[in-house]
Amino acid sequence: MLMGFKRLFAFLTLSAIAPGILAQDTAQETGESVERWGVNMTQGVTEVSRTTYDLHMLIFWICVAIGVVVFGVMFYSMWRHRKSKGYQAAQFHESTLVELAWTIVPTLILIGMAIPATKTLYDIYDTKEADLDIMITGYQWKWKYDYLGSDVAFFSTLATPHAQINNQQPKSDHYLLEVDEPLVVPVNKKIRFLITANDVIHAWWVPDLAVKKDAIPGFVNEAWTRIDEPGLYRGQCAELCGKDHGFMPIVVKAVPEDEYHSWLSDREAAAAKIKELTNKTFTFDELYARGEKIYNSTCAACHQPGGQGIPGTFPAIAGSKVATGPLNGHMSMVVNGSSKNPAMQAFGAQLSEVDIAAVITYQRNAFGNNMGDTVQPIDILNFKNK
Amino acid sequence: MAHGPKPGLTRWLYTTNHKDIGSLYLWFSFTMFLLGGCMALVIRAELFQPGLQIVQPAFFNQMTTMHGLIMVFGAVMPAFVGLANWMVPMMIGAPDMALPRMNNWSFWILPFAFTMLASTLFMEGGAPNFGWTFYAPLSTEYAPPSVTFFIFSIHIMGASSIMGAINIVATILNMRAPGMTLMKMPLFVWTWLITAYLLIAVMPVLAGVVTMMLMDIHFGTSFFSAAGGGDPVLFQHVFWFFGHPEVYIMILPAFGIVSAIIPTFARKPLFGYSSMVYATASIAFLSFIVWAHHMFTVGMPIAGELFFMYATMLIAVPTGVKVFNWVTTMFRGSMTFETPMLFSIAFVILFTLGGFSGLMLAIAPADFQYHDTYFVVAHFHYVLVPGAIFSITAGVYYWLPKWTGHMYNETMGKVHFWLAFIGLNVTFFPMHFVGLAGMPRRIPDYALQFADFNQIASVGAFLFGAAQLIFLFNVIRTVRGGSKATDEVWENPQGLEWTVPSPAPYHTFSTPPAVQ
């Protein structure tokens, strides 16, 4: 019945959209199976996640046992001791002994639960002697990962296209749980996470690692993990952080150690290359195309894909005073953020000069703004150094 | 009708009669229940399928926030105050509440508070969108301008709650009939006395935290802004110091209601009266020292984590005592299953299930996995819907013949019960599964593996909602007429309220009744 509804809905959705839209390519993720009807906590891929799972099941079975006894007595009474069967009510209403017993016995059961829970908690809190430190910063609505001790730092944002969210395209297997850049980590190494936030409170949560910690502005929280098997592990932000709270996935890619090291050096080389590009002069078309991409990954969450914004919450780009006004004001808004509205972040440190130049060029020429001007990366660098 | 009510609208505007005010509270609460329920249905309709179909994420957040605020402050709390207004004077043999003019005020400021809160939906930037827990800095630095109206309406409803609570304390302590010692009071009166103290203790804390927000937003302070030297976690400590006792405010009077109903329909005295009183007081005490179990993931030191874990687990003991006592009251009784009893039995079973998931949530290392997922949503709806809503419903069916002098329609009551019972379980039971499987709370759209259970939950929600219309219809029908109820209504119920005629006269107990 339910599946019937789903097929009907899928059919209606598919027949409504224009033909020719290709299904998302998820080939690189075919190693994973997509689980349907998951009913329980995952056992995960770390020592802590398995201990947590065992603890969860232990408490669960204790509750089941208590439930069977209590509800058993209750249903027995409801069946046997009913007026329609002519049962006469007893009149007892007190027994000190019985009332003491059901204070003491539950207390003993609770002590039995508290001991393994305390042990696990001590283990979770032991963040000492890590092999690798990664700084995680929550932003509205993306994650930034800094590999401490190296030059590698990047943002990780939702990769699911808006067309899928708005039902104009079929949904991919990992709908809403896919990112443009996963966090890459080595297996069998103790990884310490330092978790903070830039704007509001977020929470970094990956069930398979049994790590959930709030990312709080002004605080640095600690957590750790040691992953057993290579694989892709998915999670989401777990604290209401604004409009796009549901669109802030986390993907952790655990790889063998040598693969991790070659990835890290590739990323360092790529970071150096981006710096070189600052001095290059780009054509309008190059900037516009790059800017469109940046806009969709970075700006569209608030200002909307069509640049119309959300009235009363996020200003429009189309016809805005900033995007059609003096260039300096526009650069200042993107680089330094807005002093009046904290929701407009300072992107100066988040994006490279090339990307900022590209997105400004795009914003001044898209959505009917047609300003005709081009901003080069070097202009942004000069603006920053002023 | 020398001492009857004034005719017309002014009767309700100017009334100082505890029964009139009780009715006003109950009707107001039911209106809010339907409004908050419609918002829940918007949420469930959006979550019927993955993808965005009906509302945009910004509006979805407004719906979750307003649903929570309206249900907590507009539906559950006023309903209990309404029942207290109606029943406490009648149960202790008092002619009215101790402070009747203040009673009128405590009710009439509520509609203003909620009109203001609801009006934020039509303001630019929309209604509050930061969850009913309104954590800073989302609610201070990133909120829509309507947050100021939200703060003002919280102040007003807090004032209303405090006035109502003071009135109940004054009534219970000063106006009991001669011979009614504290340990002879019905449990509903006891639970409300304890609840009233909780309210007086924590509503100022809520007022304090929203005032700090107001200062941060408009007057340049930085209580919760890290950039200005403040502390976002401070917000959560202060909020939950209010918020945890608050969830007991929404459950303790329910304990009193079912403790009245179960003995009546089991035809057997309540088992362990005095341990019920002590258990209620212990729960109230413990409620003040467990607030940080809502914040296990904020990064507390391990000593704090352990303290709050142990203290939270301890609550299972007095709560267990209460459940065992109810079950023992039923044991070897002579039971019948009229609508109030059905709702009460469902209360005991489902509230216990909610208690089990509560115990699981208390275990800090496991809570890291449950926290802010649908497992929590399932937990607190299992506690609050059967706990508060079912017990209120049971109380209304139980006392409605006393209030109106007419019997409600039993068949319709049973249909209401079974639809509500099935609807509730179909809605909230699958939430345990999606929560454990990894679905966070408060998301407008979800990954595909959560689709099937969400679809089931949405169907259940609409069923639960529709069932309430039967209730509304049945109550209106009973108020307007129907078969006459006897003075005792049920077979041998206990309490002074059953010694007066049905319907209860406009002024009861002008001379105090005798209590042996």
Image: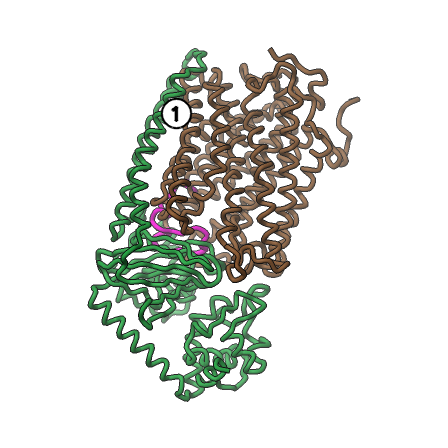
Chain colours: A green, B brown
Compared to residue B261, the image places residue A22 above or below, namely below
Residue A127: x percent and y percent? 31, 54
Indicate the chain on which mark 1 is placed. Answer: A
- Residue A121 in the image: x percent, y percent? 32, 45
Determine the residue positioned at 49% across, 56% down: B54
Q: Residue at x 35, y 56 (%)?
A: A235
Q: Main secondary structure of the magenta part?
A: helix
SS at circle 1: helix
Crowd around label 1: few <14 · some 14–19 · many ≥20 (10 Å): some
Q: Nearer the viewer, residue B273 or A37?
A: B273
Q: Is residue A253 left or right of residue B33?
A: left
Query: What's drawn in magenta, residue-wise?
Result: B426-451
Residue at 61%, 41% (x, y): give it: B31
Residue placed most toward the observer, B306 or A306? B306
Tell me, yes or no, whether the highlighted magenta stretch contains residue A277.
Answer: no
Vertical order, A175 against B71 (above or below): below
Q: Which residue does the numbered mark 1 point to in the structure image?
A: A103
Q: Amino acid at mark 1?
A: Thr
Residue farthest to the right?
B2
